[in-house]
Image: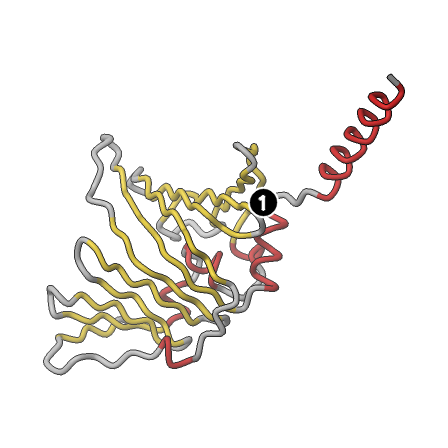
């Protein structure tokens, strides 16, 4: 049974090698921020309040291009758009016929969007710590250093060097779960993807 012993030794060696080279979630996040300059995909989002009641799920598409450009387009059940051209951030609600705009730095700041779509040093604004793996998925927790970030923490799941789920706990004890699918890091997105022109007649609210 020498052949069985050799296979066992080889298998153990391969397992040990895989463990050595397996990246933690924080390592995958840092690599994602440093190496992925643009991407697009789809998302589904659901929110559960502090009493356990859930809101209707939202689905849509997203895209980003560093530094500071991103597009978060809710398609169902109602259309909404959050888009940044790198300087200004626009939030457009067609049903309300209202557009809110503000400087992107003030809008993103230490928000969850800054973690995935930003380009700065994450450790300057967040405490990053790895969480236990679950079914071949690596998790991390990002806790904002600022007390006025608007959320307590966000847990981010990585698989194969890509983010696949975010679980955010806000200051009202609401839990928002966002699943990312069909993430394409070879999108080659043009800057025009992130340009926005307000429709005529829309009410515009400008925030500092």
Considering every residue shown, the one lying at the far right of the view is: 2
Query: Where residue 164 appears, x then y in whole percent?
Result: 46, 48
Question: What residue appears at the point 27 percent right and 42 percent down from the top-left corner?
Answer: 47
- Please tell me in which quadrant of the rendered image residue 175 appears: top left
In this view, 138 is above or below 97: above
Considering every residue shown, the one lying at the far top of the view is: 1
Closest to the observer, 171 or 85: 85
Closest to the observer, 112 or 57: 57
Q: Residues within 10 Å of mark 1 (few under 14, many from 20)?
A: many
Horizontal side of residue 60 vs 65, given as left or right: left
Query: Where residue 110 appears, x then y in whole percent?
Result: 44, 57
Question: What residue appears at the point 25 percent right and 67 percent down from the top-left corner?
Answer: 91
Horizontal side of residue 139 vs 46, given as left or right: right
Query: Where residue 161 appears, x then y in whole percent?
Result: 58, 51
In the picture, which quadrant includes the C terminus?
bottom left
In this view, 160 is above or below 131: below
What residue is disc 1 on? Answer: 25
Question: What residue appears at the point 12 percent right and 70 percent down from the top-left corner?
Answer: 97
Horizontal side of residue 206 vs 72, given as left or right: left
Query: Where residue 139 appears, x then y in whole percent?
Result: 53, 40
The total of numbered circles placed on residues is 1
Question: What residue appears at the point 26 percent right and 59 percent down from the top-left corner?
Answer: 74
Q: How is the image coloured?
A: secondary structure
In the picture, which quadrant includes the N terminus?
top right
Element marked by disc 1 = helix
């Amino acid at each position: 049974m020498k052949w069985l012993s050799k296979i066992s030794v080889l298998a153990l060696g391969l397992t040990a090698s895989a463990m050595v080279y397996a990246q933690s979630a924080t390592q995958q996040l840092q690599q994602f921020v440093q190496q992925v300059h643009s991407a697009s995909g789809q998302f589904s989002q659901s929110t559960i309040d502090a009493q356990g009641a859930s809101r209707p799920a939202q689905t849509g598409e997203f895209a980003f291009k560093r530094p500071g450009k991103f597009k978060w387009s809710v398609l169902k059940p109602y259309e909404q758009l959050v888009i940044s051209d790198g300087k200004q951030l626009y939030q457009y609600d067609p049903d309300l016929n209202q557009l809110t705009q503000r400087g992107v730095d003030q809008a993103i700041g230490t928000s969850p969007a800054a973690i995935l779509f930003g380009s700065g040093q994450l450790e300057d604004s967040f405490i990053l710590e790895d969480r236990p793996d679950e079914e071949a998925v690596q998790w991390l927790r990002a806790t904002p250093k600022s007390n006025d970030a608007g959320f307590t923490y966000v847990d981010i799941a990585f698989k194969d060097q890509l983010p696949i789920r975010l679980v955010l706990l806000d200051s009202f004890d609401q839990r928002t779960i966002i699943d990312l699918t069909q993430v394409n890091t070879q999108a080659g997105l043009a800057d025009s993807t992130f340009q926005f022109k307000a429709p005529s007649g829309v009410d515009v609210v400008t925030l500092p």
